[in-house]
Image (cartoon, rainbow, N blue to C red):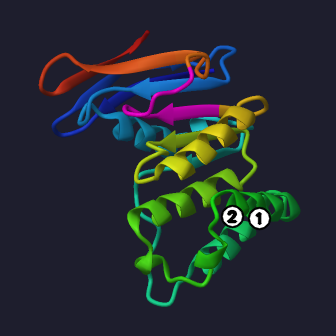
Amino acid sequence: MKIKLDIQRKYKQIQGVIDFGNARTLLLKGNNGTGKSTCLDYIKQNTLNIFEKTTVAYCSQSPQPALPGFTVQHLLNLSLEFSRDKNVTQNLQNDLIHMFEFKDKLKTEIRQLSGGENQLLKLITTLCLNADFYFLDEPFQFLDESKSTALMNYLIKLKSHKKLFIIEHKTHWPSDFFDKTYILKSQTEFQTEIYEL
């Protein structure tokens, strides 16, 4: 599968091709401001054209909705409504809640969550969807060491039967985790290109 990026924004142009081929895991990295999240937004907006018969789940850097009175449990229930298989989704939710030690937050309003707790909630609501393809934008952002370790171990298991596209620039990954790595490099102040390493 190839994803052709030709993104034209007012002050940024991003061009290149990301070719998954037979890869199960792909890393997109680059300095802050090069357009990594812009690439993910472009892919999200074109999901139906890119992924015809593949289910896709996205975990972006945007915070979860913080409506007054809207709790973690409300959001988890809502994610069940949009799942392909409610039993599988419910089991995955329970496993992730246990793994991240998040059960005591279920009745908490989302607007009261810390940055790390909000990040865990985004990961739980994304990873429980039992998708074929997961796009994770800076998944370790705001996580402490124990939660980062738990997430890394989970992703190592997940990559054996799912495809992962991860945008990251900080975390040290196991050397054999990614099948392919792409980097965004600024050519000029307004133009960025994607290269395979």
Q: Amino acid at mark 2?
A: Ile
Mark 1 and mark 2 in contact (Cβ < 8 Å)?
yes
Q: Is residue 71 above or below residue 78?
A: below
Instruction: Please state if 13 lies on the left or on the right of 143 as rendered.
Output: left
Is residue 191 covered in magenta? no
Label 1: which secondary element: helix
Identify the residue shown where x is 58% and y is 20%: 178
Q: Position of residue 187 (x, y in %)?
A: 19, 16
- Vertical arrangement, residue 136 with respect to residue 82, above or below: above
Q: Position of residue 196 (x, y in %)?
A: 44, 11
Residue at the spot of label 2: 97
Q: Is residue 56 left or right of residue 140?
A: right
Identify whether 66 is placed above or below 95: below
> Of residues 52 and 86, which is closer to you in this image?
86
Q: Where is residue 38, by image quadrant?
A: top left
To which quarter of the image does residue 162 belong?
Answer: top right
Q: Residues within 10 Å of mark 1 (few under 14, many from 20)?
A: some
Residue 143, x across and y down, in percent: 46, 52
Judging by the rendered image, the residue that carries numbered circle 1 is 94
Left or right, residue 20 beside residue 39? right
Residue closest to the far left: 189
Instruction: Describe residue 30's horizontal placement relative to residue 167 as left or right.
Output: left
Residue numbers of the magenta segment: 164-174
- Amino acid type indicated by mark 1: Asn
